[in-house]
Image (tube, grey):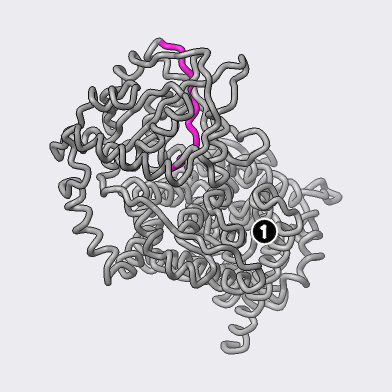
Amino acid sequence: MKTYVLIGTPNSGKTTFYNWLTGSHFKTVNYPGSTVEYNVGDISPDYGEKFKFIDTPGTYSLDPKGPDEEVTASVLFELDKENKRKNVILVVDGLHLGRSLVMALQLKKAGFPFTVVVTMHDLLEKYKERIDFSKLSAWLGADVFPFNGQTGEGLKEIIDGLKIKENFEVQKLNWTYLDQQQARNSIRIALNEMDRHENSESFFKTTHKVDAFILGRWGYAFFFIIMTVLFASLFWLATPFADGIEFLFAKAVVLLEAYFPASQWRDFITQALLSGFSSVLVFVPQIFLLFFGLGVLESSGYLPRAAALIDHPLRKMGLGGRAFVPLLSGFACAVPALMATRNISSRKERLLAMFVIPLMSCSARVPVFGLLIAFLVGDNVLVSGLFMALLYFASLLIGAIAALILSRYLPEGKDQFFLMELPIYRAPKWKQLVIHALQKTKSYVVRAGPIILFFSLVLWAGAQFPRNEMGHSPELAQSYVGRLGHLMEPFFKPMGVDWRVGVGLISAFAAREVFVSTLAVTMKVTADEETQPKELIEVMKSATFTDGSKIFTYGSVLGLIIFFIVALQCMSTVAVQIKESGSVKLALMQLASLNLVAYVLAVAVNQTYCFLFK
Protein backbone atom coordinates (compact mmCIF):
# COMPACT_ATOMS: atom_id res chain seq x y z
CA MET A 1 0.00 0.00 0.00
CA LYS A 2 1.46 3.37 -1.07
CA THR A 3 1.15 5.97 1.70
CA TYR A 4 0.89 9.73 1.36
CA VAL A 5 0.76 12.31 4.18
CA LEU A 6 -1.51 15.30 3.52
CA ILE A 7 -0.35 18.55 5.08
CA GLY A 8 -1.60 22.11 4.76
CA THR A 9 -2.63 25.23 6.62
CA PRO A 10 -6.04 25.49 8.34
CA ASN A 11 -8.83 26.40 5.87
CA SER A 12 -6.67 25.39 2.89
CA GLY A 13 -9.23 22.82 1.67
CA LYS A 14 -7.06 19.89 2.77
CA THR A 15 -9.81 17.92 4.48
CA THR A 16 -12.19 18.54 1.56
CA PHE A 17 -9.55 17.11 -0.79
CA TYR A 18 -9.04 14.18 1.60
CA ASN A 19 -12.77 13.44 1.61
CA TRP A 20 -12.81 13.40 -2.19
CA LEU A 21 -9.89 10.95 -2.18
CA THR A 22 -11.24 8.49 0.36
CA GLY A 23 -15.01 8.84 0.21
CA SER A 24 -16.20 7.12 3.38
CA HIS A 25 -13.21 4.77 3.59
CA PHE A 26 -11.41 6.36 6.51
CA LYS A 27 -11.21 6.27 10.29
CA THR A 28 -10.12 8.68 13.00
CA VAL A 29 -7.26 7.58 15.25
CA ASN A 30 -5.19 9.05 18.08
CA TYR A 31 -1.49 9.62 17.58
CA PRO A 32 0.40 7.19 19.90
CA GLY A 33 0.97 8.76 23.29
CA SER A 34 -1.23 11.75 22.43
CA THR A 35 -4.89 12.72 22.47
CA VAL A 36 -4.53 14.58 19.16
CA GLU A 37 -6.46 12.90 16.36
CA TYR A 38 -5.82 12.51 12.65
CA ASN A 39 -7.59 10.59 9.88
CA VAL A 40 -6.28 7.56 8.01
CA GLY A 41 -8.07 6.32 4.92
CA ASP A 42 -7.72 4.22 1.78
CA ILE A 43 -8.41 5.67 -1.63
CA SER A 44 -11.94 5.24 -2.93
CA PRO A 45 -12.27 1.92 -4.84
CA ASP A 46 -13.64 3.91 -7.81
CA TYR A 47 -10.09 4.86 -8.84
CA GLY A 48 -8.63 1.34 -8.99
CA GLU A 49 -5.40 2.35 -7.26
CA LYS A 50 -3.95 1.29 -3.92
CA PHE A 51 -3.10 4.39 -1.93
CA LYS A 52 -3.39 5.18 1.77
CA PHE A 53 -3.72 8.78 2.91
CA ILE A 54 -3.09 10.38 6.29
CA ASP A 55 -4.91 13.67 6.91
CA THR A 56 -2.90 15.50 9.56
CA PRO A 57 -4.02 18.48 11.68
CA GLY A 58 -3.69 21.86 9.95
CA THR A 59 -0.42 23.67 10.58
CA TYR A 60 1.38 26.83 9.49
CA SER A 61 4.86 25.38 9.91
CA LEU A 62 6.69 22.06 10.07
CA ASP A 63 8.69 23.51 12.98
CA PRO A 64 6.04 22.70 15.64
CA LYS A 65 4.82 25.18 18.25
CA GLY A 66 1.74 23.36 19.60
CA PRO A 67 0.31 19.81 20.13
CA ASP A 68 -1.41 19.61 16.73
CA GLU A 69 1.69 20.83 14.87
CA GLU A 70 3.84 18.37 16.81
CA VAL A 71 1.63 15.50 15.64
CA THR A 72 1.83 16.67 12.01
CA ALA A 73 5.64 16.86 12.21
CA SER A 74 5.87 13.48 13.97
CA VAL A 75 3.69 11.71 11.40
CA LEU A 76 5.75 13.29 8.64
CA PHE A 77 9.23 12.47 9.94
CA GLU A 78 8.66 9.03 11.47
CA LEU A 79 9.19 5.80 9.51
CA ASP A 80 6.26 3.56 8.59
CA LYS A 81 5.89 -0.10 9.64
CA GLU A 82 8.25 -1.16 6.84
CA ASN A 83 10.88 1.38 7.95
CA LYS A 84 10.18 3.51 4.90
CA ARG A 85 9.51 7.22 4.75
CA LYS A 86 6.19 8.61 3.55
CA ASN A 87 5.69 10.81 0.52
CA VAL A 88 3.86 14.10 0.98
CA ILE A 89 0.97 15.94 -0.65
CA LEU A 90 1.02 19.64 0.22
CA VAL A 91 -2.42 21.23 -0.11
CA VAL A 92 -2.21 25.00 -0.63
CA ASP A 93 -4.90 27.66 -0.87
CA GLY A 94 -4.71 29.22 -4.35
CA LEU A 95 -5.96 32.53 -2.95
CA HIS A 96 -3.14 32.76 -0.41
CA LEU A 97 -0.19 31.18 -2.19
CA GLY A 98 2.29 33.60 -0.62
CA ARG A 99 1.63 32.20 2.84
CA SER A 100 0.84 28.62 1.88
CA LEU A 101 4.04 27.93 -0.08
CA VAL A 102 6.32 28.51 2.92
CA MET A 103 5.81 24.87 3.88
CA ALA A 104 6.84 23.81 0.36
CA LEU A 105 10.25 25.37 0.98
CA GLN A 106 10.39 23.71 4.40
CA LEU A 107 9.73 20.34 2.75
CA LYS A 108 12.52 21.00 0.22
CA LYS A 109 14.95 21.93 2.97
CA ALA A 110 14.08 18.77 4.93
CA GLY A 111 14.51 16.62 1.80
CA PHE A 112 10.95 15.33 1.29
CA PRO A 113 9.59 14.50 -2.19
CA PHE A 114 6.18 16.12 -2.43
CA THR A 115 3.26 16.91 -4.72
CA VAL A 116 1.43 20.24 -4.55
CA VAL A 117 -2.37 20.47 -4.86
CA VAL A 118 -3.68 24.02 -5.40
CA THR A 119 -7.27 24.38 -4.13
CA MET A 120 -9.84 27.13 -4.76
CA HIS A 121 -9.21 26.70 -8.49
CA ASP A 122 -12.85 27.56 -9.25
CA LEU A 123 -12.37 30.98 -7.64
CA LEU A 124 -9.09 31.56 -9.46
CA GLU A 125 -10.92 31.02 -12.75
CA LYS A 126 -13.87 33.12 -11.64
CA TYR A 127 -11.69 36.14 -10.95
CA LYS A 128 -9.50 35.47 -14.03
CA GLU A 129 -6.37 35.14 -11.92
CA ARG A 130 -3.56 33.32 -13.68
CA ILE A 131 -1.09 30.92 -12.12
CA ASP A 132 1.51 29.41 -14.44
CA PHE A 133 1.50 25.94 -12.92
CA SER A 134 4.39 24.76 -15.14
CA LYS A 135 6.61 27.60 -13.86
CA LEU A 136 5.51 26.97 -10.29
CA SER A 137 6.29 23.27 -10.71
CA ALA A 138 9.75 24.02 -12.10
CA TRP A 139 10.53 26.49 -9.31
CA LEU A 140 9.44 24.08 -6.56
CA GLY A 141 10.88 20.96 -8.18
CA ALA A 142 7.55 19.21 -7.60
CA ASP A 143 4.42 18.31 -9.53
CA VAL A 144 1.66 20.92 -9.17
CA PHE A 145 -2.04 20.19 -9.80
CA PRO A 146 -5.12 22.45 -9.57
CA PHE A 147 -8.18 21.12 -7.75
CA ASN A 148 -11.81 22.26 -7.49
CA GLY A 149 -13.18 21.25 -4.10
CA GLN A 150 -16.75 22.06 -5.15
CA THR A 151 -16.93 19.59 -8.06
CA GLY A 152 -13.89 17.34 -7.60
CA GLU A 153 -12.49 18.52 -10.95
CA GLY A 154 -8.80 17.66 -11.24
CA LEU A 155 -8.93 14.69 -8.86
CA LYS A 156 -8.31 12.02 -11.52
CA GLU A 157 -5.31 13.90 -12.90
CA ILE A 158 -3.87 14.17 -9.39
CA ILE A 159 -4.27 10.45 -8.69
CA ASP A 160 -2.80 9.49 -12.07
CA GLY A 161 0.15 11.79 -11.42
CA LEU A 162 1.03 10.52 -7.95
CA LYS A 163 4.49 9.00 -7.82
CA ILE A 164 6.06 7.16 -4.94
CA LYS A 165 9.72 7.84 -4.27
CA GLU A 166 11.53 5.43 -1.98
CA ASN A 167 14.86 5.33 -0.15
CA PHE A 168 15.27 9.07 0.33
CA GLU A 169 16.94 10.73 3.27
CA VAL A 170 15.52 13.60 5.30
CA GLN A 171 17.03 15.87 7.90
CA LYS A 172 15.37 17.35 10.96
CA LEU A 173 14.07 20.80 10.15
CA ASN A 174 15.77 23.72 11.87
CA TRP A 175 13.71 26.71 10.74
CA THR A 176 14.81 30.11 12.00
CA TYR A 177 13.24 33.55 11.75
CA LEU A 178 15.79 34.39 9.06
CA ASP A 179 14.73 31.31 7.09
CA GLN A 180 11.12 32.47 7.33
CA GLN A 181 11.89 35.95 5.97
CA GLN A 182 14.04 34.60 3.15
CA ALA A 183 11.31 32.13 2.20
CA ARG A 184 8.68 34.86 2.02
CA ASN A 185 10.91 37.08 -0.12
CA SER A 186 11.75 34.30 -2.57
CA ILE A 187 8.08 33.31 -2.86
CA ARG A 188 7.07 36.93 -3.53
CA ILE A 189 9.65 37.25 -6.31
CA ALA A 190 8.73 33.90 -7.84
CA LEU A 191 5.00 34.64 -7.89
CA ASN A 192 5.56 37.98 -9.58
CA GLU A 193 7.38 36.17 -12.38
CA MET A 194 4.40 33.85 -12.86
CA ASP A 195 2.05 36.69 -13.86
CA ARG A 196 0.08 36.29 -10.67
CA HIS A 197 -1.11 39.42 -8.86
CA GLU A 198 -0.73 38.33 -5.24
CA ASN A 199 -2.32 41.51 -3.85
CA SER A 200 -5.13 41.68 -6.37
CA GLU A 201 -8.25 43.20 -4.83
CA SER A 202 -10.52 41.24 -7.18
CA PHE A 203 -10.26 38.26 -4.87
CA PHE A 204 -11.50 40.09 -1.84
CA LYS A 205 -13.60 43.00 -3.08
CA THR A 206 -16.94 41.51 -2.02
CA THR A 207 -15.45 40.05 1.16
CA HIS A 208 -14.06 43.44 2.23
CA LYS A 209 -17.45 45.09 1.68
CA VAL A 210 -19.27 42.50 3.78
CA ASP A 211 -16.61 42.58 6.50
CA ALA A 212 -16.91 46.35 6.74
CA PHE A 213 -20.50 45.80 7.80
CA ILE A 214 -20.50 42.66 9.96
CA LEU A 215 -17.16 43.38 11.65
CA GLY A 216 -17.73 47.13 12.01
CA ARG A 217 -19.89 49.11 14.39
CA TRP A 218 -22.82 46.73 13.86
CA GLY A 219 -20.69 43.61 14.28
CA TYR A 220 -21.94 42.58 17.71
CA ALA A 221 -25.58 43.21 16.77
CA PHE A 222 -25.12 41.09 13.66
CA PHE A 223 -23.49 38.35 15.75
CA PHE A 224 -26.40 38.41 18.21
CA ILE A 225 -28.96 38.20 15.38
CA ILE A 226 -27.18 35.25 13.72
CA MET A 227 -26.93 33.31 16.97
CA THR A 228 -30.56 34.09 17.85
CA VAL A 229 -31.81 32.90 14.46
CA LEU A 230 -29.70 29.73 14.75
CA PHE A 231 -30.94 28.77 18.20
CA ALA A 232 -34.53 29.91 17.71
CA SER A 233 -34.78 27.96 14.45
CA LEU A 234 -34.40 24.78 16.49
CA PHE A 235 -38.08 25.29 17.30
CA TRP A 236 -39.39 27.20 14.30
CA LEU A 237 -38.18 24.82 11.60
CA ALA A 238 -38.26 21.56 13.55
CA THR A 239 -41.89 21.69 14.68
CA PRO A 240 -43.50 20.13 11.52
CA PHE A 241 -40.98 17.27 11.53
CA ALA A 242 -41.36 16.71 15.27
CA ASP A 243 -45.14 16.60 14.88
CA GLY A 244 -44.75 13.98 12.16
CA ILE A 245 -42.59 11.78 14.38
CA GLU A 246 -45.07 12.15 17.25
CA PHE A 247 -47.92 11.15 14.95
CA LEU A 248 -46.14 8.03 13.67
CA PHE A 249 -45.24 6.75 17.14
CA ALA A 250 -48.74 7.47 18.46
CA LYS A 251 -50.28 5.55 15.56
CA ALA A 252 -47.89 2.65 16.14
CA VAL A 253 -49.01 2.40 19.77
CA VAL A 254 -52.70 2.59 18.81
CA LEU A 255 -52.25 -0.22 16.26
CA LEU A 256 -50.43 -2.44 18.74
CA GLU A 257 -53.10 -1.91 21.38
CA ALA A 258 -55.85 -2.62 18.83
CA TYR A 259 -54.40 -5.88 17.47
CA PHE A 260 -52.90 -7.39 20.61
CA PRO A 261 -54.78 -8.18 23.85
CA ALA A 262 -53.76 -6.52 27.08
CA SER A 263 -50.68 -8.23 28.47
CA GLN A 264 -47.38 -7.53 30.12
CA TRP A 265 -45.61 -7.97 26.78
CA ARG A 266 -47.83 -5.39 25.11
CA ASP A 267 -47.21 -2.95 27.95
CA PHE A 268 -43.49 -3.66 27.67
CA ILE A 269 -43.46 -2.70 23.99
CA THR A 270 -45.73 0.34 24.22
CA GLN A 271 -44.70 1.76 27.59
CA ALA A 272 -41.01 0.82 27.73
CA LEU A 273 -39.76 0.55 24.16
CA LEU A 274 -41.90 2.92 22.08
CA SER A 275 -42.86 5.36 24.80
CA GLY A 276 -39.33 5.82 26.11
CA PHE A 277 -37.50 6.02 22.80
CA SER A 278 -40.05 8.19 20.99
CA SER A 279 -39.79 10.82 23.70
CA VAL A 280 -36.23 11.50 22.52
CA LEU A 281 -36.50 10.76 18.79
CA VAL A 282 -39.05 13.54 18.52
CA PHE A 283 -36.21 16.01 19.13
CA VAL A 284 -33.92 14.60 16.41
CA PRO A 285 -35.02 17.33 13.92
CA GLN A 286 -33.84 20.00 16.36
CA ILE A 287 -30.48 18.28 16.78
CA PHE A 288 -30.08 17.98 13.00
CA LEU A 289 -30.78 21.70 12.61
CA LEU A 290 -28.18 22.52 15.27
CA PHE A 291 -25.45 20.58 13.44
CA PHE A 292 -26.59 21.98 10.09
CA GLY A 293 -26.58 25.56 11.36
CA LEU A 294 -23.09 25.26 12.82
CA GLY A 295 -21.94 23.79 9.49
CA VAL A 296 -23.37 26.77 7.58
CA LEU A 297 -21.49 29.22 9.81
CA GLU A 298 -18.23 27.35 9.29
CA SER A 299 -18.44 26.72 5.53
CA SER A 300 -19.65 30.23 4.69
CA GLY A 301 -16.59 31.84 6.28
CA TYR A 302 -18.42 33.58 9.14
CA LEU A 303 -17.09 31.37 11.95
CA PRO A 304 -13.48 32.69 12.02
CA ARG A 305 -14.85 36.23 11.80
CA ALA A 306 -17.08 35.63 14.81
CA ALA A 307 -13.98 34.37 16.64
CA ALA A 308 -12.09 37.55 15.75
CA LEU A 309 -15.09 39.69 16.71
CA ILE A 310 -15.47 38.36 20.22
CA ASP A 311 -11.75 37.99 20.92
CA HIS A 312 -11.81 41.25 22.92
CA PRO A 313 -14.77 40.40 25.23
CA LEU A 314 -13.41 36.89 25.70
CA ARG A 315 -10.08 38.33 26.83
CA LYS A 316 -11.92 40.23 29.56
CA MET A 317 -12.85 36.79 30.92
CA GLY A 318 -9.32 35.41 30.65
CA LEU A 319 -10.02 33.64 27.36
CA GLY A 320 -9.48 34.73 23.77
CA GLY A 321 -10.55 34.27 20.18
CA ARG A 322 -8.88 30.86 19.99
CA ALA A 323 -11.42 29.61 22.55
CA PHE A 324 -14.43 30.65 20.47
CA VAL A 325 -14.53 27.62 18.14
CA PRO A 326 -14.23 25.09 21.01
CA LEU A 327 -16.92 26.99 22.94
CA LEU A 328 -19.23 27.03 19.93
CA SER A 329 -18.53 23.34 19.34
CA GLY A 330 -19.70 22.77 22.90
CA PHE A 331 -23.22 23.62 21.76
CA ALA A 332 -23.10 20.39 19.74
CA CYS A 333 -21.13 18.15 22.11
CA ALA A 334 -18.62 18.82 24.89
CA VAL A 335 -16.38 15.85 24.03
CA PRO A 336 -15.03 17.07 20.64
CA ALA A 337 -15.12 20.64 21.99
CA LEU A 338 -12.68 19.69 24.76
CA MET A 339 -10.41 18.09 22.17
CA ALA A 340 -10.55 21.28 20.08
CA THR A 341 -8.87 23.22 22.92
CA ARG A 342 -5.55 21.63 21.91
CA ASN A 343 -5.00 24.57 19.56
CA ILE A 344 -4.91 26.94 22.56
CA SER A 345 -1.23 27.24 23.43
CA SER A 346 -1.74 29.18 26.68
CA ARG A 347 -2.10 26.73 29.58
CA LYS A 348 -4.29 29.12 31.58
CA GLU A 349 -6.57 29.93 28.65
CA ARG A 350 -6.94 26.26 27.78
CA LEU A 351 -7.86 25.27 31.36
CA LEU A 352 -10.45 28.07 31.48
CA ALA A 353 -11.97 26.95 28.19
CA MET A 354 -12.06 23.33 29.33
CA PHE A 355 -13.83 24.30 32.53
CA VAL A 356 -16.42 26.47 30.76
CA ILE A 357 -17.22 24.18 27.79
CA PRO A 358 -19.53 21.81 29.76
CA LEU A 359 -21.68 24.88 30.57
CA MET A 360 -22.50 25.34 26.87
CA SER A 361 -25.93 23.87 26.11
CA CYS A 362 -25.05 20.74 24.14
CA SER A 363 -27.40 18.80 21.86
CA ALA A 364 -28.16 16.31 24.67
CA ARG A 365 -29.95 19.11 26.55
CA VAL A 366 -32.26 19.89 23.61
CA PRO A 367 -34.85 17.18 24.46
CA VAL A 368 -34.97 18.33 28.09
CA PHE A 369 -35.25 22.02 27.23
CA GLY A 370 -37.87 21.22 24.59
CA LEU A 371 -40.08 19.46 27.13
CA LEU A 372 -39.71 22.06 29.87
CA ILE A 373 -40.21 25.01 27.50
CA ALA A 374 -43.33 23.35 26.09
CA PHE A 375 -44.67 23.06 29.64
CA LEU A 376 -44.08 26.78 30.30
CA VAL A 377 -45.29 28.36 27.04
CA GLY A 378 -47.51 25.72 25.43
CA ASP A 379 -47.75 25.48 21.63
CA ASN A 380 -46.56 29.01 20.85
CA VAL A 381 -43.74 28.26 18.40
CA LEU A 382 -42.46 31.85 18.24
CA VAL A 383 -42.18 32.25 22.02
CA SER A 384 -40.70 28.76 22.33
CA GLY A 385 -38.01 29.55 19.78
CA LEU A 386 -37.06 32.81 21.49
CA PHE A 387 -37.07 31.03 24.86
CA MET A 388 -34.67 28.41 23.47
CA ALA A 389 -32.37 31.15 22.14
CA LEU A 390 -32.48 32.84 25.54
CA LEU A 391 -31.34 29.62 27.22
CA TYR A 392 -28.33 29.38 24.92
CA PHE A 393 -27.34 32.97 25.68
CA ALA A 394 -27.90 32.25 29.38
CA SER A 395 -25.38 29.40 29.17
CA LEU A 396 -22.88 31.83 27.59
CA LEU A 397 -23.48 34.32 30.39
CA ILE A 398 -23.05 31.70 33.10
CA GLY A 399 -19.90 30.46 31.36
CA ALA A 400 -18.55 34.01 31.28
CA ILE A 401 -19.17 34.46 35.01
CA ALA A 402 -17.50 31.12 35.77
CA ALA A 403 -14.47 32.07 33.64
CA LEU A 404 -14.16 35.44 35.38
CA ILE A 405 -14.21 33.82 38.81
CA LEU A 406 -11.86 30.96 37.94
CA SER A 407 -9.35 33.20 36.12
CA ARG A 408 -8.58 34.93 39.43
CA TYR A 409 -7.27 31.66 40.89
CA LEU A 410 -5.14 30.47 37.97
CA PRO A 411 -1.55 31.64 37.58
CA GLU A 412 -0.96 34.19 34.86
CA GLY A 413 0.57 32.90 31.64
CA LYS A 414 2.21 34.59 28.69
CA ASP A 415 0.05 36.91 26.60
CA GLN A 416 -1.11 35.08 23.48
CA PHE A 417 -1.54 36.84 20.17
CA PHE A 418 -4.63 35.77 18.28
CA LEU A 419 -3.85 35.31 14.60
CA MET A 420 -6.48 33.82 12.31
CA GLU A 421 -6.64 33.88 8.54
CA LEU A 422 -10.06 35.07 7.37
CA PRO A 423 -11.20 33.13 4.30
CA ILE A 424 -13.32 34.76 1.62
CA TYR A 425 -17.07 34.31 1.86
CA ARG A 426 -18.36 31.35 -0.09
CA ALA A 427 -21.75 29.81 -0.73
CA PRO A 428 -22.06 26.71 1.49
CA LYS A 429 -21.96 23.31 -0.19
CA TRP A 430 -25.52 22.45 0.74
CA LYS A 431 -25.41 18.77 -0.21
CA GLN A 432 -22.26 18.16 1.83
CA LEU A 433 -23.68 20.12 4.76
CA VAL A 434 -26.84 18.02 4.76
CA ILE A 435 -24.83 14.79 4.57
CA HIS A 436 -22.50 15.96 7.35
CA ALA A 437 -25.43 17.00 9.59
CA LEU A 438 -27.17 13.67 8.94
CA GLN A 439 -24.01 11.81 9.91
CA LYS A 440 -23.69 13.82 13.11
CA THR A 441 -27.37 13.26 13.92
CA LYS A 442 -27.03 9.55 13.21
CA SER A 443 -24.03 9.47 15.52
CA TYR A 444 -26.15 11.13 18.23
CA VAL A 445 -28.95 8.57 17.84
CA VAL A 446 -26.50 5.65 17.77
CA ARG A 447 -24.70 6.97 20.84
CA ALA A 448 -27.72 7.99 22.88
CA GLY A 449 -30.25 5.44 21.60
CA PRO A 450 -28.90 2.30 23.33
CA ILE A 451 -28.42 4.19 26.60
CA ILE A 452 -31.95 5.58 26.49
CA LEU A 453 -33.40 2.21 25.55
CA PHE A 454 -31.48 0.44 28.33
CA PHE A 455 -32.62 2.84 31.04
CA SER A 456 -36.19 2.84 29.75
CA LEU A 457 -36.24 -0.94 30.08
CA VAL A 458 -34.60 -0.89 33.51
CA LEU A 459 -37.00 1.77 34.82
CA TRP A 460 -40.03 0.02 33.36
CA ALA A 461 -38.94 -3.29 34.92
CA GLY A 462 -38.25 -1.52 38.21
CA ALA A 463 -41.80 -0.17 38.13
CA GLN A 464 -43.27 -3.66 37.53
CA PHE A 465 -41.67 -5.41 40.51
CA PRO A 466 -41.98 -6.75 43.17
CA ARG A 467 -45.24 -8.46 42.23
CA ASN A 468 -48.08 -8.46 44.74
CA GLU A 469 -49.77 -11.57 46.11
CA MET A 470 -52.05 -11.77 43.08
CA GLY A 471 -49.06 -11.67 40.72
CA HIS A 472 -49.95 -8.19 39.47
CA SER A 473 -47.73 -5.16 39.12
CA PRO A 474 -47.46 -3.10 42.32
CA GLU A 475 -48.46 0.50 42.73
CA LEU A 476 -45.64 2.67 41.39
CA ALA A 477 -44.85 4.03 44.85
CA GLN A 478 -44.36 0.45 46.13
CA SER A 479 -42.18 -0.69 43.25
CA TYR A 480 -38.40 -0.85 43.35
CA VAL A 481 -38.23 2.44 41.47
CA GLY A 482 -40.70 4.01 43.89
CA ARG A 483 -38.82 2.85 46.96
CA LEU A 484 -35.53 4.21 45.63
CA GLY A 485 -37.19 7.48 44.70
CA HIS A 486 -38.71 7.96 48.15
CA LEU A 487 -35.29 7.55 49.76
CA MET A 488 -34.00 10.44 47.64
CA GLU A 489 -37.08 12.69 47.85
CA PRO A 490 -35.91 14.78 50.85
CA PHE A 491 -32.90 15.87 48.77
CA PHE A 492 -35.00 16.92 45.77
CA LYS A 493 -37.98 18.40 47.66
CA PRO A 494 -36.32 21.86 48.07
CA MET A 495 -36.14 22.04 44.26
CA GLY A 496 -39.92 21.70 44.22
CA VAL A 497 -39.99 18.21 42.71
CA ASP A 498 -40.92 14.79 44.03
CA TRP A 499 -39.23 11.40 43.92
CA ARG A 500 -40.36 10.67 40.36
CA VAL A 501 -38.53 13.69 39.01
CA GLY A 502 -35.60 12.84 41.29
CA VAL A 503 -35.28 9.44 39.61
CA GLY A 504 -35.18 11.26 36.27
CA LEU A 505 -32.42 13.59 37.48
CA ILE A 506 -30.33 10.67 38.70
CA SER A 507 -30.81 8.75 35.44
CA ALA A 508 -29.76 11.87 33.50
CA PHE A 509 -26.21 11.32 34.71
CA ALA A 510 -26.01 8.42 32.27
CA ALA A 511 -27.29 10.67 29.45
CA ARG A 512 -29.24 13.89 29.80
CA GLU A 513 -31.73 12.75 27.16
CA VAL A 514 -32.81 9.90 29.47
CA PHE A 515 -34.54 12.44 31.73
CA VAL A 516 -37.49 12.75 29.33
CA SER A 517 -37.99 9.02 28.84
CA THR A 518 -37.63 8.48 32.60
CA LEU A 519 -40.45 10.93 33.27
CA ALA A 520 -42.50 9.08 30.66
CA VAL A 521 -42.07 5.89 32.72
CA THR A 522 -42.28 7.23 36.27
CA MET A 523 -45.30 9.38 35.46
CA LYS A 524 -47.02 6.26 34.11
CA VAL A 525 -47.47 7.84 30.68
CA THR A 526 -48.82 5.74 27.82
CA ALA A 527 -49.36 6.93 24.27
CA ASP A 528 -52.94 6.79 23.04
CA GLU A 529 -54.80 9.04 20.64
CA GLU A 530 -52.85 12.00 21.95
CA THR A 531 -49.22 12.46 20.96
CA GLN A 532 -46.59 11.43 23.46
CA PRO A 533 -45.02 14.78 24.44
CA LYS A 534 -48.40 16.50 24.84
CA GLU A 535 -49.63 13.68 27.02
CA LEU A 536 -46.54 13.87 29.20
CA ILE A 537 -47.03 17.60 29.58
CA GLU A 538 -50.67 17.14 30.56
CA VAL A 539 -49.68 14.61 33.21
CA MET A 540 -47.00 17.01 34.46
CA LYS A 541 -49.62 19.75 34.80
CA SER A 542 -51.84 17.54 36.94
CA ALA A 543 -49.07 15.86 39.00
CA THR A 544 -49.24 16.67 42.72
CA PHE A 545 -47.49 15.94 46.00
CA THR A 546 -49.31 13.88 48.63
CA ASP A 547 -50.67 17.11 50.14
CA GLY A 548 -52.31 18.03 46.83
CA SER A 549 -49.92 20.85 45.87
CA LYS A 550 -48.63 21.04 42.32
CA ILE A 551 -45.23 19.52 41.56
CA PHE A 552 -44.54 21.32 38.30
CA THR A 553 -44.86 25.04 38.83
CA TYR A 554 -43.13 27.92 37.08
CA GLY A 555 -40.66 27.96 39.94
CA SER A 556 -39.79 24.26 39.92
CA VAL A 557 -39.62 24.06 36.10
CA LEU A 558 -37.41 27.16 35.84
CA GLY A 559 -35.27 25.60 38.58
CA LEU A 560 -34.97 22.41 36.54
CA ILE A 561 -33.93 24.42 33.48
CA ILE A 562 -31.23 26.21 35.49
CA PHE A 563 -30.10 22.86 36.89
CA PHE A 564 -29.67 21.36 33.41
CA ILE A 565 -27.82 24.46 32.15
CA VAL A 566 -25.21 24.31 34.90
CA ALA A 567 -24.99 20.65 35.99
CA LEU A 568 -22.24 18.41 34.62
CA GLN A 569 -24.05 15.11 34.07
CA CYS A 570 -22.10 13.61 31.18
CA MET A 571 -19.62 10.97 32.33
CA SER A 572 -18.02 10.90 28.87
CA THR A 573 -17.16 14.58 29.35
CA VAL A 574 -15.56 13.82 32.71
CA ALA A 575 -13.47 11.03 31.17
CA VAL A 576 -12.28 13.25 28.30
CA GLN A 577 -11.58 16.07 30.76
CA ILE A 578 -9.25 13.78 32.72
CA LYS A 579 -7.52 12.72 29.51
CA GLU A 580 -7.14 16.23 28.08
CA SER A 581 -6.16 18.06 31.27
CA GLY A 582 -4.05 15.23 32.66
CA SER A 583 -5.62 15.83 36.07
CA VAL A 584 -8.16 13.61 37.82
CA LYS A 585 -8.36 16.18 40.62
CA LEU A 586 -9.37 18.97 38.23
CA ALA A 587 -12.06 16.83 36.55
CA LEU A 588 -13.56 15.71 39.87
CA MET A 589 -13.49 19.28 41.20
CA GLN A 590 -15.34 20.42 38.08
CA LEU A 591 -17.89 17.60 38.46
CA ALA A 592 -18.56 18.38 42.12
CA SER A 593 -18.59 22.18 41.87
CA LEU A 594 -20.86 22.45 38.81
CA ASN A 595 -23.41 20.00 40.20
CA LEU A 596 -23.40 21.66 43.61
CA VAL A 597 -23.88 25.12 42.07
CA ALA A 598 -26.64 23.73 39.81
CA TYR A 599 -28.49 22.32 42.83
CA VAL A 600 -28.14 25.50 44.89
CA LEU A 601 -29.38 27.69 42.01
CA ALA A 602 -32.35 25.38 41.31
CA VAL A 603 -33.33 25.47 44.98
CA ALA A 604 -32.92 29.26 45.10
CA VAL A 605 -35.11 29.78 42.02
CA ASN A 606 -37.89 27.54 43.34
CA GLN A 607 -37.80 28.91 46.88
CA THR A 608 -37.87 32.49 45.58
CA TYR A 609 -40.90 31.68 43.44
CA CYS A 610 -42.64 30.07 46.43
CA PHE A 611 -41.88 33.09 48.62
CA LEU A 612 -43.18 35.59 46.06
CA PHE A 613 -46.24 33.79 44.73
CA LYS A 614 -47.46 31.47 47.47
Does 78 lie within the magenta span? no
Q: Nearer the viewer, residue 204 or 300?
A: 204
Give percent across and percent down for residue 402.
59, 70
Query: Which residue in the rendered view is the most extreme toward the right?
Result: 469
Quarter holding the C terminus is bottom right
Looking at the picture, how far across and down is residue 351, in whole percent?
62, 59
Task: Name which quarter of the figure residue 544 lies in.
Answer: bottom right
Residue 53 visible to the viewer:
yes
Residue sitting nearer the eye, 36 or 550 = 36
564 or 320: nearer the eye?
A: 320
Q: Relative to 380, is 272 on the left or the right?
A: right
**Mark 1 is on which residue type?**
Gly
What's the residue at 43%, 64% (across, down)?
A: 311
Query: Residue 124's spot in the image, x, y percent?
Result: 20, 36
Q: Which residue is under mark 1?
A: 504
For the question of whether residue 269 can be seen, the reply is: no
The boundaries of the magenta stretch are 49-60
The residue drawn where x is 49% and y is 72% is 316
Give residue 232's quadrant in the image: bottom left
* As drawn, 395 above or below 494: above
